[in-house]
Image (cartoon, rainbow, N blue to C red):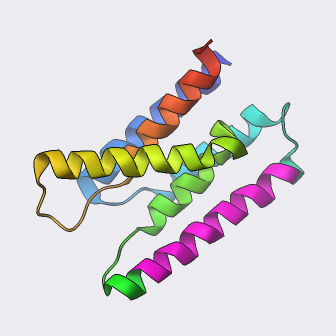
């Protein structure tokens, strides 16, 4: 279990750094997080149940992104962020998806408000990574 946890944390740190530097999350990191998450959660939830859930979360994020872009007339949520959220589903579980998204969005909004950021482009990956790390740690090491 510790090797899975270390791998996840390493990937999330790299995701956060890459997104902050380039506003892009490499697909290979999303794939690594997804595949390792499927392996990690295999004993608890069969892959035949987890993969459709991951796909559903991705499609919901994809269409939400399209709708937001249409309404705002500018890109609102990058596809790397959408893929990252979906890839993290096996790590946090189905019941924690709303919390994962709420923590990421809430912390991003808090930082934007606190720094009074004027930049329209905000790297969302670090906030998703932080929320996943927090939820995973709480699940594994909490009481």
Give the residue furthest to the top. Answer: 143
Residue 37 rendering spot, x and y as whole percentages? 68, 39
Q: Nearer the viewer, residue 124 or 13?
A: 124
Q: Is residue 77 above or below residue 21?
A: below
Asked whether, in this view, residue 11 is left or right of residue 60, the answer is left
Q: Quadrant of the C terminus?
A: top right
The residue range painted magenta reads 49-68
Q: Quadrant of the N terminus?
A: top right
Whether residue 68 is visible, yes or no, is yes
Residue 77: name its quadrant. Answer: bottom left
Residue 134 rendering spot, x and y as whole percentages? 48, 30
Residue 51 rendering spot, x and y as whole percentages? 78, 55
Prevalent SS, magenta region: helix
Q: Is residue 66 above or below residue 7?
A: below
Asked whether, in this view, residue 86 is left or right of residue 21, the answer is right
Q: Residue sitting at 34 percent across and 44 percent down?
A: 107
Q: Residue sitting at 26 percent across and 46 percent down?
A: 110
Q: Is residue 33 magenta?
A: no
Residue 123: name its quadrant. Answer: bottom left
Q: Is residue 59 magenta?
A: yes
């Amino acid at each position: 279990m510790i090797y899975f946890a270390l791998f996840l944390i390493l990937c999330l740190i790299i995701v956060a750094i890459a997104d902050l530097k380039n506003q892009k999350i490499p697909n290979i990191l999303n794939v690594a997080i997804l595949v390792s998450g499927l392996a990690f959660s295999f004993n608890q939830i069969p892959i035949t149940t987890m993969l459709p859930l991951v796909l559903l979360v991705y499609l919901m994020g994809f269409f939400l992104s399209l709708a937001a872009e249409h309404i705002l007339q500018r890109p609102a949520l990058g596809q790397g962020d959408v893929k990252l959220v979906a890839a993290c589903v096996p790590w946090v579980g189905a019941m924690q998806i709303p919390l994962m998204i709420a923590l990421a969005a809430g912390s991003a909004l808090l930082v934007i408000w606190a720094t009074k950021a004027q930049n329209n482009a905000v790297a969302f990956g670090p906030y998703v990574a932080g929320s996943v790390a927090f939820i995973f740690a709480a699940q594994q090491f909490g009481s």
